[in-house]
Image: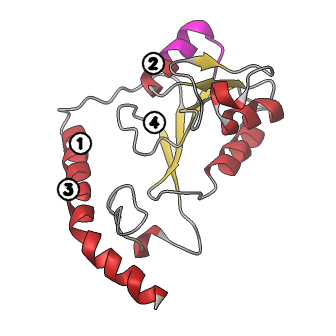
Amino acid sequence: MYFYTVKILQILVFPFSLLYGLILLVRNILFDFGIFKQKSYEIPIISVGNLNMGGTGKTPHIEYLIRLLKSEFSLATISRGYGRKTKGYIKASLESTCEQIGDEPKQYKQKFQDVEVIVDENRNEGIEKIITENNNIDIILLDDAYQHRSVRPGLSILLTDYHKLFSSDYMLPTGTLREFRGG
């Protein structure tokens, strides 16, 4: 019975999924044609993200990239700081709390004290402050920034759950996709 109830609800909200997807499609087209601006930076930027809501391993992948690159490069990470109670640009310290910077940035700072950990909901402003405050950063890692189109990364890494591939999912609210599969 539960299965059929879920299926009926998915069918009922499907028009909202199409509307949401259409809005995002128009937004992406505006970025693609340069009407909405993307900014490139001279410093290498790696974006890690996903198409669907929920966990796909972005945090462990950022940690993997840090471990892979930190011996040869000076790194900084920028996260929105999901769940934090503050706004704007904050440079994490060991004394920063989860309420100030969010739990994932707190975890990055505790594990990798020599890496600059920044939270800023505006990724462009965060990147520009990193560049002006610390000119020895070699690479910036953007956490959960795949849909953040105002920054043009040099490399985008798209993650998906092996057991629930985005290719068999649907747009919110019918499914868990933040944008169409083609994104």
User: Is 80 left, or right, of 178 in this rendering?
Assistant: right
**Residue most extreme to the bottom:** 1
Q: Amino acid at mark 4?
A: Pro
By secondary structure, the bulk of the magenta-drawn segment is best described as helix
The percent coordinates of residue 142 (x first, y second) are 55, 36
Nearest to viewer (mark 4 / mark 2): 2
In what element is the residue under mark 1? helix
Q: Nearer the viewer, residue 88 or 28?
A: 88
The stretch of residues the image draws in magenta is 128-137
Mark positioned earlier in the residue sequence (1 or 4): 1
Name which residue type carries label 2: Glu
Residue depicted at 81% across the width and 31% down the height: 110
Q: Earlier in the sequence, mark 1 or mark 3?
A: 3
Residue marked by disc 2? 125
Q: Residues within 10 Å of mark 2 (few under 14, many from 20)?
A: few
Q: Image quarter for residue 98?
A: top right
Q: Nearer the viewer, mark 2 or mark 3?
A: 3
x and y percentages locating residue 16 in the rendered image: 24, 62
* Colour setting: secondary structure
Q: Secondary structure at mark 4?
A: loop
Nearer-N-terminus badge (4/2): 2
Please tell me whether residue 182 is drawn above or below residue 141 in the rendered image: below
Q: Look at the numbered disc 2 and give the secondary structure of its residue.
A: helix
Which quadrant of the figure contains the C terminus? Answer: bottom left
Q: Mark 4 sits on what residue?
A: 153
Q: Amino acid at mark 1?
A: Asp
Task: Tell me the distance, in whole angstroms, between the alpha carbons under discs 1 and 2.
Answer: 21 Å
Classify residue 149 as left or right of residue 17: right
Residue identifier under label 3 = 22
Mark 4–mark 2 distance (CA, rounded to whole Å): 14 Å
